[in-house]
Image: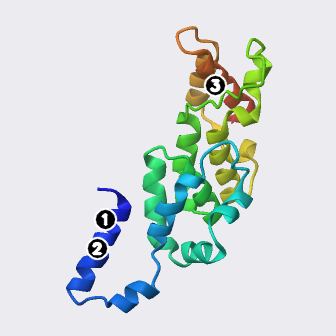
Amino acid sequence: MNRLYANALLIWVLVMAGCMSVSRVAQTPDALIVLEEKLHLLDGPEVDGFPYIQRVFTEDELYLLHEQIRRVEPDINQRLTEGDYRAAWVAGYLRLRSSLQLLRQGLLAERYFYGWEGPDYTQDSSWLHDWQYTHHLAYIAAIEAITGRSIHEAVVLTDSEFAYLRAESVSSDISKEDRMRARWLLLKLKRKDH
């Protein structure tokens, strides 16, 4: 059952049981419903960071998300757990410290490569432009916003993470996209104690 339907059903049950009046339902917007309705708009290469959120959500909706942050936070973290990188934009905008570990995991696990039409993909340098990794950029922006530090300082690779990415970056058993993603991450992140 999708979240929007579940929330509507809950409100209907509360109204029918007399726990909530219809007028109160009309007066009290639900941040989860707003999130459900708008999150899909935070997709694509045109998302240029947190200013984009202010173009997607109205000022009132952003206020509502802040006002109901404790209600929204578990939903955002669940979405991050499920690999929904769009939730990273909202987590970063709201500065959800509880999301940091999930954002870090998402950054390292994400496999999306944009594959823009223009570059010459016979050249390795074409694979290493930031805009090729739009989903990763959402995780990076969120981590930097929450920690107040650059990604180099905020996410330090463990020895095993570094070894894994290094092995992927030269492996002939995976796609070139995955090899180059690993190389790009190695350029973005630093290794523990190095």
Assign a secondary structure to mark 1.
helix
Discs 1, 2 touching: Cβ within 8 Å: yes
Residue 193 at least partly seen: no
The residue identified by callout 1 is 6
Element at label 2 = helix
Q: Is residue 74 above or below residue 42?
A: below
- The image quadrant where one finds the N terminus is bottom left
Q: Label 2: which residue?
A: 10
Residue at point 50%, 68% (across, down): 34
Horizontal arrangement in the rendering, residue 164 relative to residue 122 (left or right): left
* Total number of numbered discs in the rendering: 3
Residue at the extreme top: 172
Residue type, label 3:
Ala
Which quarter shows the C terminus? Answer: top right
Q: CA distance from mark 1 to mark 3?
A: 39 Å
Above or below 51: residue 16: below
Q: Is residue 151 left or right of residue 76?
A: right
Residue 86 horizontal/vertical position (percent): 56, 50
Residue nearest the viewer, comparing 77 with 176: 176
**What mark, if any, has residue 177 been given in the picture?**
none
Q: Is residue 25 visible?
A: yes
Q: Which residue is mark 3?
A: 182
